Image (tube, rainbow, N blue to C red):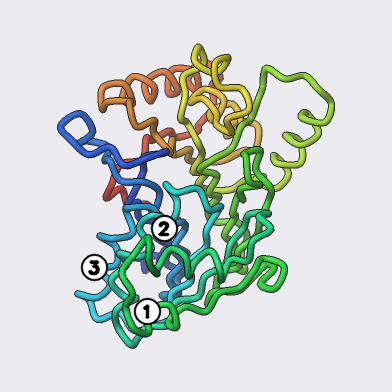
Amino acid sequence: MAASVPPRARIRFWGTRGTCPSPGPRTVRYGGNTPCVEVRGADGALIILDAGSGIRALGAQLVESGHTAPIHLFLTHRHSDHVLGLAHFAPLFNRTPRIRVCGGDGEAESLAAFTRSMLTPPLFPYVDGMSTRLDIMEWDVCRDPLAGSLTVRRFTARHPGEAAIFRLDDDAGPLVAYAPDNELSYHDGAEAVRAWRRALCDFLADVPILVHDATYRDEELARYIGWGHSSHLEAARLALECGARTLVLFHHHPDRDDDGVERMLDECRTFVSREGAPLRVLAAWEGLALAV
C-alpha cells in the first residue's frame, strides 16, 4: 500500500462572524466569534489571519499545548471586528513565543502605534511587557513575507480602509486565499471595477481553498453599496471564475441566524450544481478544519 501523502497545509476556523460578536442560541451552529483563521504549514509554521474575538480560544489552545515557536499574525485591516481579540490572546502574557504582526491595509497611522493603543489604557489595563512581545512590521517592510515554508501575498480588497486579501503559497503554488471583507460588485459594469475583478481572478487562479466574504444575500446588496461586502452568490461566482476547488462562505452577518446561513449555503450549492462545476461549497463554522 502506498504511503499517504501528508497535507501541504491545515486550516482551522476560530471565528467566522463579521461586524461584531453575536453569541447566543441563534448562532451556535456556525459560531458568533469574529474573524480568526489558523493556518499551519507542512513544517509546522503557524500563521494566524486576523485577531477577531475568535483568537481568544486559539490563544488558550496554544498555551495549553506548550507552543513556543514564532507566531505570524496577519491583519487584513483594522476594523474592530478583526482586531478586538488581540488583547485577549493568551501567548501575549508569556515570555515565549515571539509574535510577529504584519498589517495589510493602507491606513496612514503606523501599525505599531495602533497596536499599542489596543493593548494599553483606556482600551485595556496596562500589563508590563505585553506589547514588547510583538514584532510589528508594516506591509511595505514585510512584503511577501515568509513564515517557515509559507509565503503570504497581498491583493487590495474593495473595502473601506484598503483591506487586504491574502493568498498563502508554498513551493508548489497557492494553498488558501482569505478575503473576509471584499465588495465584488458584479452589478457594477464600470471598466475600472471589471478590470479589478479580472486582476483579482488572476491573483486567485486555481487556489485550492477560497475563504470569501458572504455577508449579504443578493437582494440585500442594493442597500449596502460601498460598505465593502459581497453576497453568497457573488462569492460562488468568483470561485467558479478563478477555478477554486473549495469555497468557504465567511464573515456571516451578525443578525443572520444558523438557519439563514444554512439557506445561503444551500442556494450556493444549487447555483454551482446548475453550472455543472465540481466546486465544493461550505459555510465556515467555528472548529471547521480543512487540509490542502
Residue 218, placed above or below residue 3: above
Mark 1 vs mark 3: give the one in front: 1
Q: Nearer the viewer, residue 277 or 125?
A: 125
Q: Position of residue 262 (x, y in %)?
A: 31, 24
SS class, disc 2: loop
Q: Residue at x 23, y 33 (%)?
A: 27
Farthest residue toward the front? Answer: 122
Tell me if mark 3 has few (under 14), some (14-19) or many (20+) residues whose alpha carbon lies within 10 angstroms of its own.
some
Front residue (pair 94, 211): 94
Q: Is residue 144 above or below residue 16?
A: below
Q: Give the CA distance from mark 2 to mark 3.
A: 15 Å
Q: Amino acid at mark 2?
A: Ala
Which mark is first along the chain, 2 or 1? 2
The residue carrying mark 1 is 130
The type of residue carrying mark 1 is Met
Mark 1 or mark 3: which comes first in sequence? 3
Identify the mark nearer the N-term, 2 or 3. Answer: 2
| Residue identifier under label 3 | 61
Dot 2 corresponds to which residue? 51
> Mark 3 and mark 2 in contact (Cβ < 8 Å)?
no
Q: Is residue 213 above or below residue 177?
A: above
